[in-house]
Image: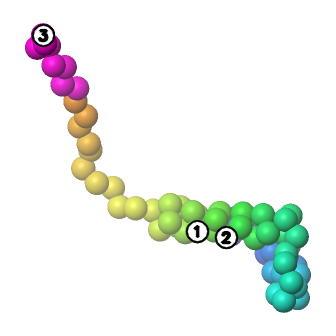
Amino acid sequence: GVFEPSAVARLWAKCKARAATQFSNTDNMAVVGVLSTQLLHEQFIRSAPTPRAAIQLGTLVDKLSS
């Protein structure tokens, strides 16, 4: 993983204990940061997309006068 498991476990336990009330802004941002990072890591690092054929880009310049 990307994060220290014991720190994330403490954060998760803290949030579960406050399930009936609002999280602090700091705790909310920390949870969202951990979840977002883990999802990105899963999608793009651990399960990297399969390579596809190279994309060829081109430019078309319209030189017709109006």
Is 50 colored magenta in this rendering?
no
Please tell me whether the stretch drawn in magenta is mainly helix, strand or loop.
Answer: loop
Disc on res. 39: 1
Label 3 environment density (alpha carbons within 10 Å; few <14, some 14–19, many ≥20): few
Which amino acid is tagged 3? Answer: Ser
Residue 44 place in picture, x, y as percent: 50, 61
Q: Quadrant of the N terminus?
A: bottom right
The picture quadrant where one finds residue 2 is bottom right
Residue range of the region highlighted in magenta in the rendering: 59-66
Foreground label between 3 and 1: 3
Q: Residue at x 85, y 65 (%)?
A: 25
Which amino acid is tagged 2? Answer: Leu
Residue 42 place in picture, x, y as percent: 55, 69
Which amino acid is tagged 1? Answer: Leu
C-alpha distance separating marks 3 and 1? 51 Å
| Residues at marks 2 and 1 touching, judged by CB atoms closer than 8 Å | yes
